[in-house]
Image: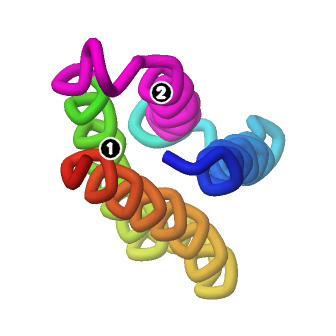
Amino acid sequence: MEQETELKVILKSKELNKYTIQKTDSSKFPKKYTFTFRVRLQNKSMDIYEMLMDANRTNLNTNGKRRIELQSRVINECDKFSYYIELLLDFKIITDKSAAYWSKLVSDVKYMTIAWRTRDKER
């Protein structure tokens, strides 16, 4: 993965983390959904960042299969995350505007990771 693109997907995942923590802040988020959504979303956003960092630090030449597995897991976690955002919107816990912005962050991470994985597979 190119250094500039690597940095972009990792930076985007940091944005996702920050926004997730802000949106699920305990003072604003309904208490009854703490474990159903709040904790799960926060953990998932951190997991996405950690897996991207791990993939970035995994040498493609010596451990390419592991790197591609991590990238694939990030893509899968992004799909789950998007569904949770959809549920939050359905339960009227977040606004359409928040859902759109949050979904865009997740989508950016997902598609940047797909592009990275595709390039790695072609090498």
Q: Is residue 43 visible?
A: no
Q: Is residue 90 left or right of residue 13?
A: left
**Magenta-drawn stretch contains 9:** no
Q: Where is residue 93 shown, x and y percent of the image?
A: 57, 65
Occupied quadrant, residue 111? bottom left
Q: Which residue is mark 2?
A: 47
Q: Nearer the viewer, residue 20 or 106?
A: 106
Q: Is residue 109 left or right of residue 4?
A: left
* Residue count near mark 2 (Cα–Cα under 10 Å), binned few <14, some 14–19, many ≥20: some
Kind of residue indicated by mark 1: Glu
Would you say residue 26 is visible in this rendering? yes
Q: Is residue 48 above or below residue 43?
A: below
Element at label 1: helix
Q: Residues within 10 Å of mark 1 (few under 14, many from 20)?
A: some
Q: Position of residue 63 (x, y in %)?
A: 26, 15
Residue under the image location 56 percent in, 33 percent down: 49
Q: Residue 118 placed where, x, y %?
A: 26, 58
Q: Nearer the viewer, residue 89 or 13?
A: 13
Magenta-drawn segment: 39-66
Q: Which callout, 2 or 1, points at the residue further toward the start of the chain?
A: 2
Q: Are marks 2 and 1 in contact (CB under 8 Å)?
A: yes
x and y, in percent, of residue 54 in the image: 47, 19
Query: Mark 2 is on which residue type?
Result: Asp
